[in-house]
Image (cartoon, rainbow, N blue to C red):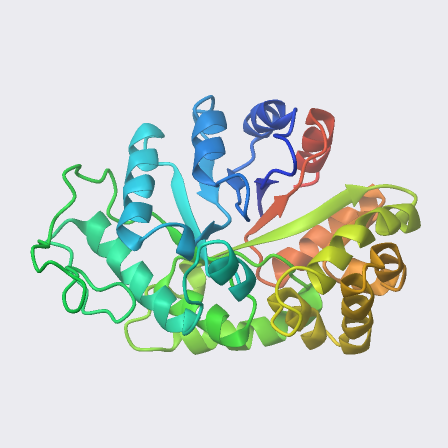
Amino acid sequence: MKLGLQLGYWGARPPENAAALVAAAEDAGFDAVFTAEAWGSDAYTPLAWWGSHTTRLRLGTSIAQLSARTPTACAMAALTLDHLSGGRHILGLGVSGPQVVEGWYGQRFSKPLARTREYVSIVRQVLAREATVTSIGPHYPLPLTGTGATGLGSALKPITHPLRADIPIMLGAEGPKNVALAAEICDGWLPIFYSPRLAGTYNEWLDDGFARPGARRSRADFEICATAQVVITDDRAAVFEAMKPKLALYLGGMGAENTNFHADLYRRMGYTEVVDTVTKLFRAGRKDDAATVIPDELVDDTAIVGDVHYVREQVAAWQAAGVTMMVVTGRSSEHIKELAALV
């Protein structure tokens, strides 16, 4: 089992202790550090800024949103950071949801699976640098032709030679088809709310992808980097209560009311009634009430909270379920050291 540090995306202001957390993770033997983006801070700038002070940690996006960059722009960022870090970049991608894609980026959300497949294919062409980069589309046609195009576009190769043609590409995925796609075309999966209780279901989805013709990886060399809240405490109930407001946001307010992939994920875990109630309350402006209806069992399904002995047992259970890296949120340098001692 490896450990990764999840810095996530920023709230109203940049976090004050991120540099210290990254330094502590490097000293403690963590394998990677990840950043994210929503509709505020971007994923790449903080990763490059704080990553420049490291020498060993892998530097990953978890996740960079497809609609934030064209495939070639994303590949440019990836090859640039990979050079600057000496070959330590992990490119984590995700489609986000229609609320962000259409509301923030002004792009169409339709056909996310097909868009992801085409996007990854173009990124790999750039990184391989074996020929000029082309795509027949329909989502990212290169060169652009047809109505509105000048007809002067040229198929190009990247000027910069990528340091690695095989920069790991991982996919943030929550549904069965998207997880299977990750297993088919990517090097790893980045689940945001992982439950070892559903490991058998996840394995069915992954095996579907591994079995497809031309699948890039097998289970033996495929990474599963699961984001997890890991807290060592003797007061589980208090920690659960502190976690519930953010869960209420993800279940009830993150995404459109009827298209929320996080909510769908918890419905698959058996919490449909809870999710529906949280959504109703949250969207009615009753955010505090939405948090209070979340049972401890729901929080416990995708987090590890307890004393040292319990946490060690659960980390072993996640590893037995197939997780290769636990991507944890660190509160302080001391918390980072505490977590490292468990693995």
Q: Residue at 62% across / 56% down in the picture?
A: 319
Please identify the quarter of the rendering in which residue 285 is found: bottom right
Residue 343 vertical position relative to residue 65 in the rendered view, above or below: above
Disc tally is 0
Give x and y (percent) for residue 274: 82, 72
Q: Residue at 41% across / 58% down in the picture?
A: 221
Give x and y (percent) for residue 61: 47, 45
Residue 57 seen in render: no
Give x and y (percent) for residue 143: 14, 59
Residue 137 vertical position relative to residue 26 in the rendered view, above or below: below
Residue 223 vertical position relative to residue 242 in the rendered view, above or below: below
Residue situated furthest front in the rendering:
148
Q: Residue at 73% across / 46% down in the picture?
A: 230
Residue 252 vertical position relative to residue 152 in the rendered view, above or below: below
Q: Is residue 6 left or right of residue 299?
A: left
Give x and y (percent) for residue 6: 59, 41
Q: Is residue 168 left or right of residue 310?
A: left
Residue 30 seen in render: yes
Q: Which of 22 and 69 is in front in this view?
A: 69
Q: Which of 302 and 318 is in front in this view?
A: 302
Q: Residue at 50% across / 54% down in the picture?
A: 104
Please identify the quarter of the rendering in which residue 29 is found: top right
Q: In this view, does 299 lie to the left or right of 124?
A: right
Task: Say which quadrant the C terminus sits in.
Answer: top right
